[in-house]
Image (cartoon, rainbow, N blue to C red):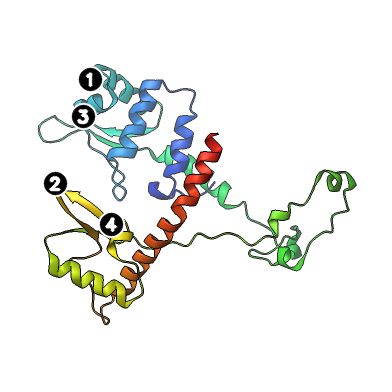
Amino acid sequence: MSTVRPFRDVKLQWLQQLSCSKDLSDNARSVALYVVTTHLNGHTEKAWPSYQTIADATGKSVKTIQRAIRELETSGWFEIRRGNGIGHNTEYRPSAASILRASDAREKTDKVVTLYPSEGGQKRLARRSHVSGEGGQICPPNPEKEKIYKPNPREDAPSRVKETRRAVPLVFVAETRTKQIEQWRTWLRRYGLPPLETLSVRMFKAGNPGYALPGYWPPDKEDLRAEAYITFFRYRQAFLSEAPVRRIKTQRMSR
């Protein structure tokens, strides 16, 4: 027989044996599980919950709790020292006999070890082996599977990756801001871009005509936003040039 271990080392085995005990009622088992898992101190191996605390937590009456505790005491699962009710609650402690049974169960599981090949065990691959990378068994050809499988010509085709661009927030520049609008026209000509009238950026805001532009003023050459603005207008130009083609295709499909 093994030596008695601290309860915290055999708590799992103790709970397993308690849950499988056929001599305990469901009420007693429920009370024991609650006391051990909620109130038991891991160092002193004691607990001091009141009857009312256990009753509130388990949803049972105080008399049912008292009967369950007497059952746990007489069946040898707990050593109970009853208090006087004035600042001294009843003390619960797993019995030495129940801890010894759990220690025996723990020792049996600890003795189950893996034998090395020299001790009569089986050989097994080490963890993180590279067998799959070095090649395993060669599978025989399967003619039936080859008949069913037909290579897809699209598999070898290069994948189409959509060119993504970052969205540029637009601001409203009123048409009355002639100085700003004129600077935008000059900036567009400098980079070989079409004028504002052909970029379809004209809009109305609160009844006032104006333009939806990337900024209130065009950026300087050293400004990091200049490249993003140029890209925006070029995409705008390309979109407008492809619009008639898309309309013709849509009309043909509708027919």
Q: Nearer the viewer, mark 3 or mark 2?
A: 2
Residue 72 screen position, x and y as percent: 36, 27
Left or right of 221, for residue 206: left
Q: Nearer the viewer, mark 4 or mark 3?
A: 4
Left or right of 169, for residue 3: right
User: Viewer-proximal residue, 52 or 220?
Assistant: 220
Residue located beneath label 2 in the image: 207
Sequence-wise, which precedes: disc 4 or disc 3?
A: 3
Residue located beneath label 1 in the image: 62
Residue at position x 26%, y 74% in the image: 187
Task: Give the distance between the C-alpha atoms of the residues marked 4 and 2, in whole angstroms.
Answer: 16 Å
Task: Give the distance between the C-alpha atoms of the residues marked 4 and 3, in whole angstroms.
Answer: 73 Å
**At label 1, which amino acid type do we have?**
Val
Q: Nearer the viewer, mark 1 or mark 4?
A: 4
Q: Is residue 52 above or below residue 120?
A: above
Task: Give the distance between the C-alpha atoms of the residues marked 2 and 1, in whole angstroms.
Answer: 78 Å
Residue at position x 29%, y 25% in the image: 58
User: Viewer-proximal residue, 201 or 50?
Assistant: 201
Q: Secondary structure at mark 2?
A: loop
Residue located beneath label 4 in the image: 201
